[in-house]
Image (cartoon, helix red, strand yellow):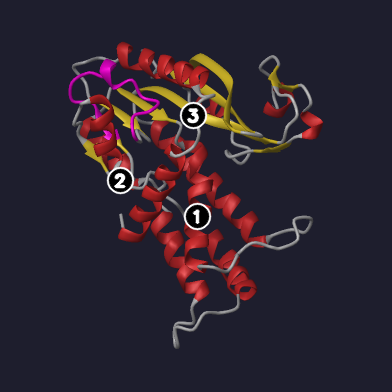
Amino acid sequence: MSKPLSRLLRLEQTAFLARDRTAWGPHLARVRGFLGEGLQAADPARPVLILGAGSGLEVPWGLAPTGTTGWDADPWSRARTALRHRRWAPWVFEDLTGGLGDLAAAARRAVAEPWSGRHRDPQTAALRLAGLVPFLRPDPAALRAWIEVHRPGTILAANVMGQFGAVAERVVEGAFGKASPWAADAERSDPLAEALEAWTRRALEAFLETLAGSGAALWLVHDRGVAFGPGSLELGPWTDPWMAQLRGGVEGLEVSDPLMGLDVGAALRAAGRDPHRRDRWVWPLAPDQRHVVEALASLPTGA
């Protein structure tokens, strides 16, 4: 993990922790209960891995078997977990997408002329980057290698998948500096935004493929959607497409999909990993910003 990326991820985590958490009580109780169930069900004789462990805010480390390993690229995540839970856990500081480094390098190439180092105008640089991104193939090689060596019995993904796209956007914006890489007119298509959404989808698919093939019990928590605006938001019955589950004043909301159309449950079923436990709820992250959180658990075939 390069120093610029480590610094970026540290700043992202710091900004997250600085938010007003007064309305987070029900969310924290639900996510801790779900992940705690996974930790209590884990075989203590086999390694346990917590992906996106962060500062330990959503992870009940007191229930984790001895030797449980945390994974978070934020360089301060382990220390924050130790302060919060008095537990200095084994840790991996790596990019779970396996592609942020290549994305950052492509963004730098698009922004600066290689022969002079001068910056191209933002619109030209954005179009150049939009042409480069489709050739990038994020590959979670570090995660796959860890799984092959340690053979974990249980893997938890603690609200990390919905962050892939947001962090990729920050990486691109970091290369552009004070200039914006995004189209100014929200009503017009943005080639770079579309290319980055496709990159995020590829990263999510590769990540889930690695987890599904791990042979471990999976306990996955992730943002299914994000709603912006003051309208009411409730959840109806589970159905496809996922936005059909939304009830209330949805017409007054702007709803985004951090998973870029990927259905985690369907992806698990396609890999022969039917979810045996599922839950979901609305998390009021900030005023006029609510997240639909999905929690899925899946046992390995034959378990």
Q: How many marks?
A: 3
- Considering the numbered disc 3 on the image, is that residue within a helix, a strand or a loop? loop
Q: Which residue is mark 1?
A: 170
Q: Are marks 2 and 3 in contact (CB under 8 Å)?
A: no
Residue 58 inside the magenta-drawn segment: yes
Q: CA distance from mark 2 to mark 1?
A: 22 Å
Left or right: where 53 falls relative to 230: left
Please name the amino acid that badge 2 sits on.
Ala
What amino acid is at disc 3? Arg
Q: Residues within 10 Å of mark 3 (few under 14, many from 20)?
A: few
Give the image location of residue 231, x and y in percent.
75, 29
Q: Range of the magenta residues?
A: 55-70
Residue 21's tag is 3
In the drawing, what numbered circle is on residue 81? none
Residue at the extreme right of the image, as rendered: 251
Disc 2 target residue: 142
The single residue placed furthest to the bottom in the displayed view is: 116
Q: Is residue 78 left or right of residue 125?
A: left
Determine the secondary structure under disc 1.
helix
What residue do we see at 40% from left, 23% from top?
A: 218
Q: Position of residue 85 (x, y in %)?
A: 26, 25
The answer to if 36 sits in the magenta stretch is: no
Q: Nearer the viewer, residue 50 or 182?
A: 182
What residue is shown at x 52% (from left), y 17% (from top)? 26
Residue at coordinates 45% horizontally, 16% vertically from top-left? 29
